[in-house]
Amino acid sequence: MATTQATPVMDIPAHVPPELVREIGLTTGPEFLAAPHAFMAKLHETHPPIFYSVNPLIGNSWCTIKHEDAFFALRHPEYFTTAGATPFPRDPNNYFHFIPLEIDPPHHRKYRAILDSTFSPQSVLRLEAYMRRLTNDLIDSFIDTGEVEFTTAFGRPLPVSIFLDLMGLPQEMRDTFVGWAVDLLHSQDRMTAGLAMRGIEAYLAQVIVEKTARPDEGVISTIIQARPGGEPLSEREIFGFTFFLFIAGLDTVFATLNNIWLWLAQNPDRRREIIAHPDQINAQVEELLRVFSVTFSGRTLTQDLEMRGVQMKKGDKFNSILPACNYDPDVFPDPTRVDFTRPRKPILAFAGGVHSCIGAHLARLEVKVALREWLRRIPDFAVRGDALISYWPGGVVGPRLVPLVW
């Protein structure tokens, strides 16, 4: 991999050793986009545990590929703040935080508590029958055709439809919402992303006004009506909370399902193994989530810190490449192998610490139900012979299209 610098030397802090500087094209380079998970797994063979990534598109930062280091960063907000963790442009004169992601402890807790009961294991489990019906309705719509473009016919509508029902948002707007999310997360064009950002802002501002006047049972209304410490949230707090959930809910499970079904289609023996051991579904889902993690975790150092002999300074950006951390051979021997009998260890598919994904239980159940119902009804399938698989650039890793035949 190239180690040349694509940005001026002045953009690299003086305390960064030149031998740790890398330009690897993370999330946007041709090698990454050809096979992103293989690319990130290989970093353990070609890169030091901590290196300094130079990236003209997403900015420069320290990067770790070690499970232990990411775990530390995620669990120690006194060193690693999430403030400004998202790169999306916001009006400085009407600024809002992405809540609860960009709020550090102890204030983070008051926001997280608002939705803890909504996304608890017990509450999520009550959605299982509904998920199963939706899954089968989607399969009914294409099973007799013998082929399907998975991402648009199943991978997207399943988790996004569930999410919209939870939020209290209209199903008929699904394609518009997804279009905004794709433009914001994957376009790599500031103008396109800015237009999407403004579209989302205008729409959600209107929704919040409507649900303030006429609340329903959805998550947005729950946020509006919340009274942490006896006080209502401010208009900017409500907006930032709603905006963050809107973006977070539209792309991650979608990408995860696309990655998993591509692997299933390419590995018939492993598919049959899943079908033959239905009692191991929880372990199967956990291992698939480990191998096909889709997100990263950005932080900013709040004070100087040395890790593995590397001196980092206050204000430096720090990125845990979570998929690579889930391939750490010190934690997961033979890490690229999908092994459903692996001893249970913490995976970082949903980050960790106080900022672990609030929707993790929901996502696990969605994958579990989708696997069971799809493999029950379509046990044998493959990628269409003429298909060329390519991947989206950006901070959520998944294939653009997965055309399947059976």
Image (spheres, rainbow, N blue to C red):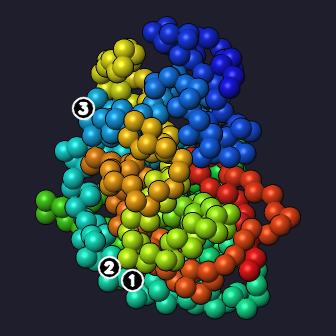
**Numbered disc in front, either 1 or 3:** 1
> Which is more toward the observer, 297 or 10?
297
The kind of residue tagged 3 is Glu
The image quadrant that residue 308 belongs to is top left
List the residue tagged with mark 2.
125
Label 2–label 1 contact, CB within 8 A? yes
Residue 171 x, y percent position in the rendering: 56, 81
The kind of residue tagged 1 is Glu
Residue drawn at x 30%, y 35% is: 72
List the residue tagged with mark 1.
128
Circle 1 residues within 10 Å: few <14, some 14–19, many ≥20: some
Residue 97 x, y percent position in the rendering: 39, 48
Residue drawn at x 46%, y 26% is: 49
Residue 94 appears in the rendering: yes
For marks 3 and 2, the one nearer the N-term is: 3
Badge 3 element: loop
